[in-house]
Structure formats: C-alpha cells, structure tokens
Image (tube, helix red, strand yellow):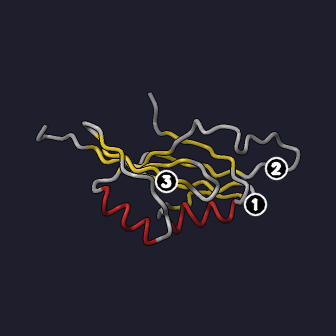
Amino acid sequence: MFKSGSVTIEIEDLKAAEQFYVETLGLKVQFQVEGHLVQVEAPGLTIGLVHPREGQDSHLGKSGSVHIGLEVEELELAIQLLKSRGVEFQPIMEEEATRIAYFSDPEGNPLYLIELKFGPEM
C-alpha cells in the first residue's frame, strides 16, 4: 500500500539545517529549491526541510510532536561519530527491546537514534 514515508519540518535557518542533516548526520540531498526547501534522504525516510515563504503561515516552534527516529546497528558507535561532529545527546533510554538516544537539530527539533535489541537470538 505505502511505497515510502516522509516528514516535513519548518526551519528558520535553512542553511544551518542543511549543514546539520547533510554534513553532521551524513544524509544525502535528494532535491532542493534555493532558499525554501532541502529534501534529504535517510534509509526508508525522506525529510523535507522547509523555510516558509513570505506571507505563508508558519508553524515554527509551535509543536514538539514530531520526532525523527533513525535506526542504527550499534548505538555507541553512532553516538561517538555524531559527538565528534558536535551533536549533544541526552542519556540513553534502555527498554526491553530498544535503546534510544535523543538529540536535537540546530533549531531544537527532536531526533533520536534507536538500536533494536531483538533478533534471531531472542
């Protein structure tokens, strides 16, 4: 039924957001409209970074309901790499089947890395 997924985040500083998502997180730019949109690709997810146009309704900072999760195989290695690029993490949350580490983009939008602990051995 569904082919892929995407999320769109309104961004005040599009250049800083692009740098964070591309250079810091290592995602690839799929498409962009100069000064308005940068669309980046994570495995199985497209993230649209949008700067509202003049006169367009803006929802900047009005909701913290969107969290972007990126699955990793080895949480500590991913954290170590991103910390070397200046990312600050909250303490790891450990549950029965997952380990999650939250962080934020330059505008405070919440993201997290998730390591699934289940597999053939469980």
C-alpha span from label 2 to label 1: 9 Å
In this figure, which residue is indicated by the disc labeled 3? 103
Judge by depth and name the residue closer to the eye, 106 or 52. Answer: 106
Spot occupied by residue 24 in the image (x, y as percentages of width and height): 50, 66
Judge by depth and name the residue closer to the eye, 105 or 57. Answer: 105
Residue 19 figure quarter = bottom right
In this figure, which residue is indicated by the disc labeled 1? 35
Residue 14 figure quarter = bottom right
Mark 3 residue crowding within 10 angstroms, few (<14) / some (14–19) / many (20+): many
Give the residue type that dot 2 points to.
Arg
Mark 2 residue crowding within 10 angstroms, few (<14) / some (14–19) / many (20+): few
Residue reaching furthest to the top: 1
Name the N-terminal-most of marks 2 and 1.
1
| Foreground disc of the pair 3, 2 | 3
Spot occupied by residue 33 in the image (x, y as percentages of width and height): 71, 58
| Left or right: residue 4 compared with residue 54 | left
Q: Which mark is residue 120?
A: none
| Left or right: residue 117 compared with residue 37 | left
Name the N-terminal-most of marks 3 and 2.
2
Q: Residue at x 64, y 55 (%)?
A: 107
In this figure, which residue is indicated by the disc labeled 2? 53
Mark 1 residue crowding within 10 angstroms, few (<14) / some (14–19) / many (20+): few
Residue reaching furthest to the left: 121
Give the residue type that dot 3 points to.
Phe
Spot occupied by residue 119 in the image (x, y as percentages of width and height): 18, 41
Q: Relative to 6, is 16 above or below?
A: below
Give the residue type that dot 1 points to.
Gly
| Foreground disc of the pair 1, 3 | 3
* SS of the residue under disc 1: loop
